[in-house]
Image (spheres, grey):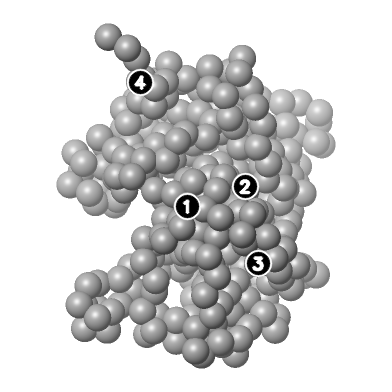
Amino acid sequence: MSEHAPVLADSPFSINTLAAAQVDDLLARADAFGLAIERLDSGVTLIDGGIDVRGSTAAGVAVGAICMGSLGEVRLSVRPEADWPTWIEVASAQPVLACLGSQYAGWSLSASKEEAGGRKFFSLGSGPARALACREDLFAELGYRDRAERGVLVLEVDRRPPQVVIDKILRDCGLAPEALTLILTPTTSLAGSTQVVARVLEVAMHKAHDLGFALGDIVEGSACAPLPAPSPDGGIAMGRTNDAILYGGRVQLAVSGSDEAAQRLAKALPSSNSRDYGRSFADIFRDYEYDFYKIDPALFAPAEVWVSNLDSGRSWHAGAIDMALLRSLWLEVDA
């Protein structure tokens, strides 16, 4: 946990207000993006990104930008020379708020079998509405709380949330039902896998926070990662999106402060520092009996990192991507 002063206490940005225009654009282009829109009797809007519809990669790019509170850019690039054709590129000039204050999937939402109609429900909420509710200790560290008339939350789920969860979101966010939009993106879908890989910069920001680096010294960030095809198997789909970042994610952070701190950050950031590095995430998860808390936390990081100190003009590099491993996991080879 960082012991530095809150970095966002004086932030002028309302990420929910900023994201509202992108949410409206997503709603207007729902047919083109392969999405389904459902307005509940209460007035809450649900956007189905891949449960009962196909969805699309383009929708995932748009959802990725919404997740960042409109303070980040997300786009596709085609790189046939990079041993995998399609990559996600992400950048932000406000990386602490965009990634940690908005995009990070940190809001735990659950319901019992009885509350959910016979089957337990669990999801981690991400996106701007987290900063309306501020149910996570992280927001006290950041010193940020949003105020807005509308809110949007992204759930990585394969079914609609039960009413008890929706009611909790409304209550904690202080929103009227007609002011809440929930975007549902299963990781097995095109949109779901895309918006998860678009978290490559956020993963680096979260790791920097865990390492105790002064978040206020991170000026901006950019990142990229290869985009795998989604799998209809939830475990494989989750493994692929994690592997994309752990073994294919590249991040550059521009920082201020001392050269010593910048160098230490570069050295400590890459996923190769983990004892669990080198195997598919799906295999690691299985071997730890599907318990995230048994996995070495150092694994949750991008593969390759550059840290540039703007005060001195010096840069440091650590880690490396492993496209050979990713191709062995993602690409079918004829016998």
Amino acid type at circle 4 is Glu
Q: CA distance from mark 1 to mark 2?
A: 12 Å
Image side of residue 174 versus residue 325, left or right: right
Which residue bears the numbered disc 1? 54
**Are there few (<14), some (14-19), or many (20+) residues within 10 Å of tag 1?**
some
Q: Nearer the viewer, residue 84 or 15?
A: 84
**Are there few (<14), some (14-19), or many (20+) residues within 10 Å of tag 3?**
some
Q: CA distance from mark 3 to mark 4?
A: 36 Å
Q: Secondary structure at mark 2?
A: helix
Q: Secondary structure at mark 4?
A: loop
Q: CA distance from mark 3 to mark 1?
A: 16 Å
Image side of residue 170 versus residue 150, left or right: left
Q: CA distance from mark 4 to mark 2?
A: 25 Å
Which residue bears the numbered disc 2? 58
Numbered label attached to residue 27: 3
Q: CA distance from mark 4 to mark 1?
A: 23 Å
**Residue depicted at 49% across the width and 64% down the height:** 48
Which residue bears the numbered disc 4? 332
The number of discs equals 4
Q: Secondary structure at mark 3?
A: helix
Amino acid type at circle 3 is Leu
Please identify the residue farthest to the top as the structure is shown: 335
**Residue depicted at 67% across the width and 76% down the height:** 146
**Are there few (<14), some (14-19), or many (20+) residues within 10 Å of tag 4?**
few
